[in-house]
Amino acid sequence: MLLGIDHVQLAAPAGCEEAARNFFGEALGLEEVEKPGELRTRGGVWFRCGNQQLHIGVEEGFSPARKAHPAFHVAGYDALLARLRQDEIEIVEDDTIPDLRRSFVSDPFGNRIELLESLT
């Protein structure tokens, strides 16, 4: 029986760690989680998001996920979007779902990220 999602992993190219820390840690405000010892040699970086984690893993022959994506519930939606705009991160807003504010951004590697705020 599945109980929930532990983590989501996004792929990134080798050497991605600093850009991942800047985007996911600084711009989005996620807390970095230390990777277990033996896994550190594989590269990448992990972050905490509530009770779940987001893992950025190095993939040989990396190609970004442009359709598949994680979606994050956001507190302070306007403030986050303002911070992203200040960092010159392109935001694509979408109003197709009633009672939901949502937008899409791309991480530094081209992976799609959805940001959500419920209006109800």
Image (spheres, grey):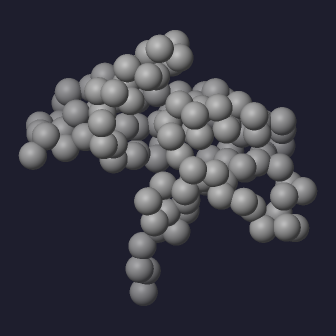
User: 48 or 14: which is nearer to us?
Assistant: 48
Number of numbered markers: 0
Q: Looking at the picture, does residue 49 appear above or below residue 70? A: below
Horizontal arrangement in the rendering, residue 13 relative to residue 29 (left or right):
right
Q: Residue at x 47, y 14 (%)?
A: 86
Horizontal arrangement in the rendering, residue 99 relative to residue 105 (left or right):
left
Q: Residue at x 40, y 37 (%)?
A: 114
Q: Quadrant of residue 98?
A: top left
- Residue 82 in picture, x, y percent from top left: 37, 20
**Furthest residue toward bottom:** 1
Q: Residue at x 63, y 51 (%)?
A: 32
User: 15 or 81: which is nearer to us?
Assistant: 81
**Does residue 68 appear in this view?**
no
- Residue 12 in picture, x, y percent from top left: 72, 39
Q: Looking at the picture, does residue 82 appear above or below residue 70? A: above
User: 118 or 70: which is nearer to us?
Assistant: 118
- Residue 68 in picture, x, y percent from top left: 49, 43
**Does residue 33 appear in this view?**
yes
- Residue 37 in picture, x, y percent from top left: 85, 67
Horizontal arrangement in the rendering, residue 60 relative to residue 2 (left or right):
right
